[in-house]
Image (tube, rainbow, N blue to C red):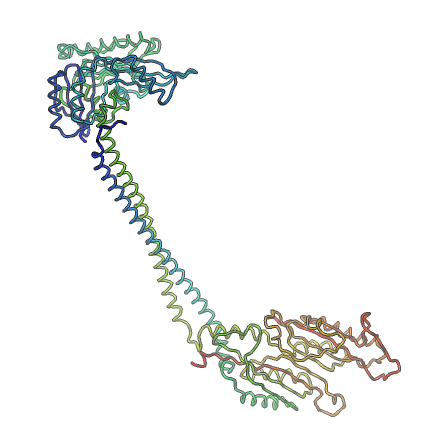
Amino acid sequence: MKLPPKTGHRLVGPALVAIALIAAGGVALAVASQLLASAQADQQAARAERGAEQNKLVRANDEAREIRERIVEYRKLVDRGVVGEERRLDWVDRINAIKAARKLAEVKYAIGPQRPAEYPGITGGGEVEFLASPMKLDLALLHEEDLFRFIGDLRSALSALVVVKACNIERTAEAGKGRGLAPRLRAVCELDLVTIRDKRASKG
Amino acid sequence: MQKRLLYFTATRVLLYRWAHGRLVVESSYANNEDGAHAFAAQLRGAPASLFYVLVDIVEEDFHQENVPFVRGSDRRALIARKLAQRYRDTSLSVALSLGYEKTQRRDERILFSSFTNNAQFQPWLAALREQEAAVAGVYSVALLAPQLAAKLGSKKAPLLLVSLQQAGLRQTYVESGKIRFSRLGPLEAADAADPARVADAFDRETTRVYQYLTAMRVVAREGGAIDAVLIAPSGEKRRVQAAGPNMPQVRAGVIELGEAARAIGLKEYPEGAGAEVLFLHLLAQRPPAVQYAGDNLRQHFRLHQLRVGLVAGGAVMCLLALGYAGILLTQRHGLEEQVEVDRQRAKAAADEYQRVTKAFPQLPTTTDNLRATMQRYDSLTKQTSAPDRLAAALSQSLDASPTIQLERIRWELAANPRERIRDADPGRPRSAPARPPTAAPQARELYEVAEVTGKVVGVQSSDYRRMNGAVDEFVGRLRTHPGAEVLQVKLPFDTGSQSSLSGDIGADAEKVPPFTVIIARKLSL
């Protein structure tokens, strides 16, 4: 293509116009890109917020269902005295009452100092603490059924969860010698009297 | 930029202005030195324009020749050499490709054309050059005829176009959209003024050019009739029709100038103008790709193209950017709608959350504590048992085994009773200290285990077969209890090959050896 000589200056104007147009397009593109990026960020934030709120709602619904399911049992534990401080005097009264009611010849018991209960699945931190008071029972029995009834009475009467850990039932030396209603069995059992300390509940 | 067209005939040169399909005569000059001076004077004061020169003269030459199949610079050199061989002055010349021969050599058919007397243009072109006018090119009516033929007749079929211009009566033969022949037959002034003579001229010239074409074998004699379109002056259609060529080889159709102008989109043209206005309009609207002028004359047009190209390029880039920006903004709009939907859903979920939490029952503790308490409590109660269940199984078996008397039951909870039995020293009597199941705090299984010690009564101690048999019978009954599993049995007399066996036949018959059975039951955690 042949151009007239010395025409560079005649191209300056159109070149400037072209540059201005390209720059205008570039600015428009940059602004649009910026706006799109901002909208994308807004969308991510809104989506995250929506997800968080919906998750909260799902958790709240689960929690509501769980509360409805558990609150009845929990209140029963509170009413029984399982949740709260242990009541040893009350326990002693109840044991004496059971002995009298069952007409047991001999009931020896020893309750040790309270300590954190150590059972699989119930340890762990937090505001809820399961505490166990170890109790050793030594009973003279006419029949092994007396032991089972005694343990059953303890479970229903004491303000604690009664966990039987071990029992040794042995025929006594006097058994079978024909001395009337003398105890023929001796049972030695180890139990845990478990209570639950809820820091929030006790504060409340 | 305003488009101006210079219509160049042998006697006069007319300057037209074209805009939006309207053609206006600005000036008319005699084709001589004075006219050229007047034109130059007018150019000096005129605004910058884009000039198209349309030449309609007799002194033009068309020559078809086959050249070897070559490309690129070789082709350009070959064509330049051919033009130089044929024409003395090649400053206004052109070579049109008509296609390739269907032979093995594939020779290219080229129509060479030039004006044979360039001197008559020089003062006019010099005036344009002097004023640095942007001259798009120099064209002949013949170059534009294929466009007009395509609009008025068929695009592919051969067509003979006969039109009356100020320069005279032009006949152009177009085949497959390409010009094959063109000739201008000038009319005497007296003939041009008489409509009857003009009509006769149409007949005479059409017949003559057909005969020439057949003589030159451009048109085959036995090829059948060809179409001809005669563009009659305004109001002369009937006369031209009546005087039209009466020969079977030519199917002549007559169209009036006004009809032709409408057909090609020419809205307005000077009264009394000839068919040149059709060619001028087509030239202004869509100039042909080939033209006669060399690069020297078109320098300022090239500059104009470059200037326009720069601005157009910038505008295209700007439009592309704006278009893409528009797409991005549309996407943004879509995102904003999604954001709004997400926010509404989040708000609805938050409102629902408030409603659900307000409906929570009044708790004596926190929800987490409630959950922790009840989960651990459930876990603990599953680990809780009492000796009564295994004792019941023992009792049922004892009822059916009257010779068995139990001496001791050691009951405990254990996580891994088999392991404990395996680890125990077989030579040492097993003591069963009460151990909590915490020995394996992570155990997933828990068993209640009872070690039962007893003896067989009512059987002589020396009758070891009955004694062992009674114990086996008792153990067999224990095994039938659902859930109960006998882990170990130590008979009164251990007759296993791996054990020591001893006896004292004269010893005290009252001394009865004991047996031991370890029974377990799995708790469901």
Q: Nearer the viewer, residue B179 or A96?
A: B179
Q: List x then y, in percent, for residue A66.
A: 47, 70
Q: Residue furthest bottom?
A: A179
Residue at image x 71%, y 84%?
A: A170
The one of A168 and B289 positioned closer to us in this rendering: B289
| Residue B126, above or below B456 | above
Residue B523 rendering spot, x and y as whole percentages: 62, 72
Q: Is residue B225 above or below residue B463?
A: above
Split into 4 quadrants, where in the image is the N terminus of chain B? top left
Position of the C terminus of chain B by quadrant: bottom right
Residue B10 in percent (x, y) is at 17, 14
Left or right for B31, reference B447? left
Q: Is residue B267 visible?
A: no
Q: For this view, does B187 lie left or right of residue A183?
A: left
| Quadrant position of residue A204 | bottom left
Q: Nearer the viewer, residue B228 or B515?
A: B515
Residue B117, quarter of the rendered image: top left
Please indicate, yes or no, whether residue B436 appears anywhere in the rendered image.
yes
Q: Is residue B234 left or right of residue B290?
A: left
Task: Point out residue B252 in the picture as x, y percentages from the top left corner.
Answer: 26, 14
